[in-house]
Image (cartoon, coloured by chain):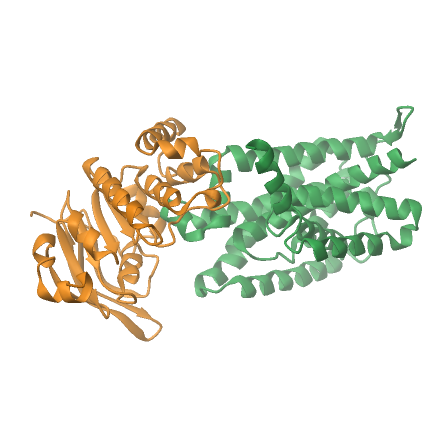
Amino acid sequence: MSDPLLQVDRLDAFYGDLQVLWTIQLGIGTGEIAALIGGNGAGKTTLLRSIVGLHRNRTGSIRFQGEEISSLPPHSLIYRGLAEVPDERGIFPDLTVEKNLLVGAFSLKDSRARREALHWIYQVFPILEERRSFLARSLSGGEQQMLALGKGMITRPTLLLLDEPSSGLSPLMVSRLMDHIRRIHQEGTTIFLVEQNVRHALRIAHQAFVMENGRIVLQGPADRLSEDPRVKKAYLGR
Amino acid sequence: MLLQQIINGFVIGAIYSVVGVGFTLIFGIMRILNFAYGEFYMLASYAAFVAYSEFHLPLWLILLLTMTVLFAIGALTERGLVKPVRERTADWSVPVIMVTLGLQIVLQNVVLLVAGGTYRGVSAYLMGTLDLEWFVISYERLMILGVSAGLLLGTWLLIQKTKLGLAMLAVSQNREGAVLSGIPLQRVYTLSFGLSAALVAIPGVLLMPLLYVYPTVGQVPIMKAFAVTLLGGMGNIEGAILGGIILGVSETMASAYLSSLIKDGVAFAFMILILLFYPAGIGPYFQQIRQKVIRP
C-alpha cells in the first residue's frame, strides 16, 4: 500500500492528567475497510474523537491525505472529505428525516448539490424517503442507524469513520448494516469501522487493529487476525 | 366586550411572543439565559425615544435602524464577552449566565449615568382608531399586531427555510453532530445572539409609548420573556409564540375583569398552574398534536 490516506503517529490522549491513549500508531490506505476492535473502555471512541478533534487534549501527529489536521477545528474536516458517524449516531431527534439529511449535506456548497445528494441517499435507502417527514426520534433503531449512515455518506466523503454502528441492533439488522457499509465502500469511500461486534467487523474488513487499555496491541490483515488464537479466545469465544 | 378584550390580549400577546422568541432562541442554541436581554430592550427604547422625539424619523426607519444597531450590539456581546468565557472552559453555561447578569447591572448603571433616572416617553406613534362595529382597535395597536406577526413569520421562515436556520436547529439539538456536519459553531452563536437582540429591539421601540423608558425598564420585558419561555418550553420557538399569546390574553382578561393592579399576579399564577400540569411547557404537546395531524 502506498501513501496512507490517514496516518496517526505517536498519539497520546488525556482526560485531565489521566493518560488514556498511549503512542497510537496506525495507517489506513485509500480504498480499504479498516476495523478497530476491542472491549468496552479500551479507548476506541476516544481514538476516533481524537482523530476528528472533538477530543483536543492530545499530542502527536494526525495526517489526512498527507496534511497535518490535528490543529484544525473539527467542523472543517468534512470539507476536506473526512466524515464521522459518532457513537450516539449524531442525528437530530426533533428534526425530520429529510432535515437530518440536509444537515448532513451542510458542507455542500449550493442547494442544488444538496438536493441531488438527498435524492441519491433516497435511492440507497428507500425507507428514508418513505419516512422523510417523520421526526428522527420516532424511527426504529435500525432506521435510525440507516439515517445516521445516510447522513454520514451524503457528502461522499473520502474517509468515513463509523463508531459502533451496530450498537443496539438485532442480529438480523447487524448483517444488513454490514451490507450497507460494504455498499458505501463500493461507492468509493474508505471506511474506518470501530466495532464491538468483532465477528462481523473482521468479516468485512481488510485490515484490523486490536485495542486494549488505550494501546494498539495487535494489527494485521483481518483474515489473519480472525485466525489468531488470542483474538479467537478474547473476542470470538472459540 | 369579551371579543374586545380578547383582541386587545392578542395584540399584547403578539409582542410578548416576539420578546419570548428572542429569549428562547438563545436558550435553545446555547443553553444559557441572557440576563442582559431586558437591557437590549431598554437600549432600543432609548434609541427610539431619541430618534422619534429629537430627530423626528419615521417609524419604519426607527424600526430598521434599532434592529440593525441591536443586531450589532448582540453580536459584539457574544464576540467580546461570551466567546472568551466559552473558550476557557468546557462547562461554560453558568459562567456565561453570570457574565450576562453582570452586563445587565453595568448597562443599567451606565445608562443611569448618561440619561438620568427620569421616565421618558412619547404619547403614541399613531393616532386614531378603527371602528369595526364588533370591536374598536387603535391604529397603534393594529400596527403593533402587524409588525409582530410579520416579525414572527420572518423568524419562522428564517429558521425553517434557510441554511442558517438549519444550522441553528442542528446546534440546538446535538452540538457535536452539528460540528461533524461542518457547521461552524462560533458563527452560529454570534449570529444567534445578534438575531436575538435584533428581535427584542422591536418590542423596545413599539412598547416605549406604553411602558415609557428608564434605566431599569428592562425588568418588565425580561419577566415576560421568562414567563413566555417557560410556558412554551425552554428553547421552543413555536411554544414561545403560543406562550406569548396566552400571557397577553390572560393579562388583559385579568385587568379587564379583576383589576389592572393584579394583572401580573393573575397572569403568573396562570403560568404556574399550566406548569404544574405541563412542566416541560406546552410547546412539545402542541407539536405532538401537529405531528398527528400531519400524518394520522
The picture places residue B238, in percent across and down from the top left corner, at 63, 41
Q: Quadrant of residue B11?
A: top right
The picture places residue A7, in percent across and down from the top left corner, at 17, 54
From the viewer's side, name the closer residue of B5 and A137: A137
The picture places residue A181, in percent across and down from the top left corner, at 24, 43
Can residue A81 be seen by looking at this rendering? no
Q: Residue furthest bottom?
A: A17
The letter of the orange chain is A
The letter of the green chain is B
Q: Residue furthest top?
A: B132
**Relative horizontal placement of residue A135, taking residue B278 as reference (left or right):** left
The residue under the point 48% across, 34% down is A133
**Relative horizontal placement of residue B186, taking residue B232 as reference (left or right):** left
From the viewer's side, name the closer residue of A173 and A3: A173
Can residue B111 be seen by looking at this rendering? yes
- Quarter of the image where the C terminus of chain A is located: bottom left
The residue under the point 76% across, 34% down is B145
**Relative horizontal placement of residue A36, taking residue B201 as reference (left or right):** left
The picture places residue B178, in percent across and down from the top left corner, at 42, 47
**Vertical position of residue B266 compared to residue A150: above or below:** below
The residue under the point 13% across, 52% down is A207
